[in-house]
Image (cartoon, rainbow, N blue to C red):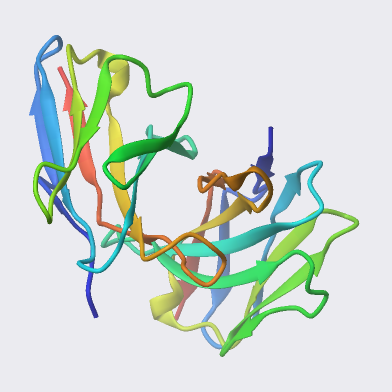
Amino acid sequence: AQTVTQSQPEMSVQEAETVTLSCTYDTSESDYYLFWYKQPPSRQMILVIRQEAYKQQNATENRFSVNFQKAAKSFSLKISDSQLGDAAMYFCAYRSVEGGSEKLVFGKGTKLTVNP
Amino acid sequence: EPEVTQTPSHQVTQMGQEVILRCVPISNHLYFYWYRQILGQKVEFLVSFYNNEISEKSEIFDDQFSVERPDGSNFTLKIRSTKLEDSAMYFCASSEQTGFNQPQHFGDGTRLSIL
């Protein structure tokens, strides 16, 4: 079974600075999807960024980018120019491609605080 | 932007009672999911539902649980004979299709407290 580990329960960053959230995963599959979701205090989980495992190029979405290291099974999220609105829980998630499973496997989350 | 809506936001129920959690997925979505998050733990997959039947379920989703799409808009999770350990946040999600370009959209969640 696949597992996702987020080793940082909490992180903090100064406004306008850059922060990197860590995520590692364990799988025997060669193709899969990886996601970062953001859950602000309002509770709704919002997709931030996604990566296909067979694509070597790291995904970027505006101030959000990932560092995908397939061999190391690492998928970190970098937030540049942090804003107060970035404060939230961030969840890393894995989804299998093989076998037709649709479920997302989540990490425990990292609580990000942005200091003004 | 269309959203997944869940009601109620907080449900308090006596142990042993039945509870129904309600979700209205995004209108053109065809795939529906329930997840739960026990306080301090990971978000866990419960079940996925497509074409009026369960397409996948986890080991958590035992006979105590059932899902239903009673009409064209609602998607419900029923928990029979609730236990203290059922206390958790329950998230509903939907997607237009499965696949990388069809991410799951989540609702705000229902906080279920079993007394």
Q: Residue at x 90, y 57 (%)?
A: A71
Asked if residue A78 is positioned above or below residue B67 in the image, the reply reads below
Image quarter of residue A16: bottom right
Q: Residue furthest right?
A: A71
Q: Is residue A11 left or right of residue B111?
A: right
Q: Residue at x 39, y 78 (%)?
A: A85
Q: Is residue A6 left or right of residue B91?
A: right
The one of A37 and B80 positioned closer to us in this rendering:
B80
Q: What percent of the width, then of the height, locates residue B27?
A: 20, 67
**Observer able to see residue B73:** yes
Image quarter of residue B83: top left
Q: What percent of the width, then of the height, locates residue B57?
A: 44, 31
Asked if residue B84 is positioned above or below residue A43 in the image, the reply reads above
The one of A80 and B96 positioned closer to us in this rendering:
B96
Q: What percent of the width, then of the height, locates residue A37?
A: 49, 63
Q: Is residue A92 left or right of residue B5?
A: right
Query: Number of numbered discs present?
Result: 0
**Observer able to see residue B46:** no
Q: What percent of the width, then of the height, locates residue B25?
A: 22, 58
Q: Is residue B92 left or right of residue B21?
A: right
The one of B3 and B25 positioned closer to us in this rendering:
B25
